[in-house]
Amino acid sequence: MITALAATKAYASAQKAMGIDPGLGGSEVAAPGGGFADILKSAMTDAMKASKNAETQMANQVQGKAQLVDVVTAVSSAQSSLETVLAIRDQVISAYQEIMRMPI
């Protein structure tokens, strides 16, 4: 089950991926024209980068080259990115199911 804090972080991250600044009442900060595929690609790319960064930090911690706080921060970021991807997936599935329920 996703906590309210995790959902809020995932929502804010999704807004950021769409080019919307959540702190400014939803105003656009990126140039329009990016399609849904670009949003999905961006979210997946961010999730993969965060995951690789977390793995690198964990390896550095084992070798004694990184501090524990860096590892925790990287893992937290990776978790947040993954929750964003899962939230987007859930919304896509929900939209698809809604479309399939529409009468022809």
Image (cartoon, helix red, strand yellow):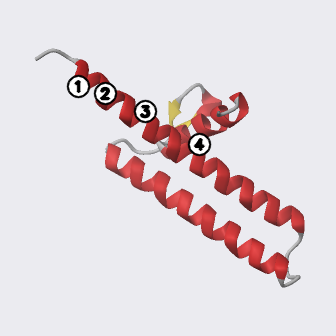
Q: Do the residues under discs 4 and 2 have CB atoms within 8 angstroms?
A: no
How far apart, in angstroms, are the residues tagged by discs 1 and 4?
28 Å
Separation of residues labelled 4 and 2 (CA atoms): 24 Å
Query: Which one is earlier in the sequence, the residue at label 4 or at label 3?
Result: 4
Q: Residue flagged by tag 4: what amino acid is it?
A: Ser
State which tag comes first along the sequence, 3 or 2.
3
Work out how far the residue at label 1 is from the one at label 3, CA to CA, in angstroms.
14 Å
Determine the residue positioned at 48% across, 51% down.
43
Answer with left or right where residue 66 lies relative to residue 13.
right
Q: Disc 2 designates what residue?
A: 97
Dot 1 falls on a residue whose secondary structure is helix
As measured in the structure, the alpha-carbon distance from the residue carrying label 4 to the one carrying label 3 is 14 Å
Residue sticking out furthest to the left: 104
Q: Position of residue 45 (x, y in %)?
A: 48, 60
N-term-proximal mark, 4 vs 2: 4
Cβ atoms at labels 1 and 2 below 8 Å apart: yes
For disc 4, the marked residue is 13
Q: Which residue is mark 3?
A: 91
The amino acid beneath tag 3 is Gln
Q: Which residue is mark 1?
A: 100
Residue type, label 2? Gln
The type of residue carrying mark 1 is: Met
* Residue 84 coordinates in the image, percent (x, y): 55, 44
Mark 1 or 3, closer to the camera: 1
- Against 46, residue 86 (above or below) is above
Of the 4 image quadrants, the one containing the C terminus is top left
Task: Please report whichever mark, 1 or 4, sits nearer to the chain's N-terminal start.
Answer: 4
Q: Residue sitting at 83 percent across and 76 percent down?
A: 61
Q: Closer to the camera: disc 4 or disc 2?
A: 2
Callout in the foreground (4, 3): 3
Of tags 1 and 4, the one toward the viewer is 1
Place of residue 1 in the rendered image (x, y in percent of width and height, measured from the top left): 65, 33
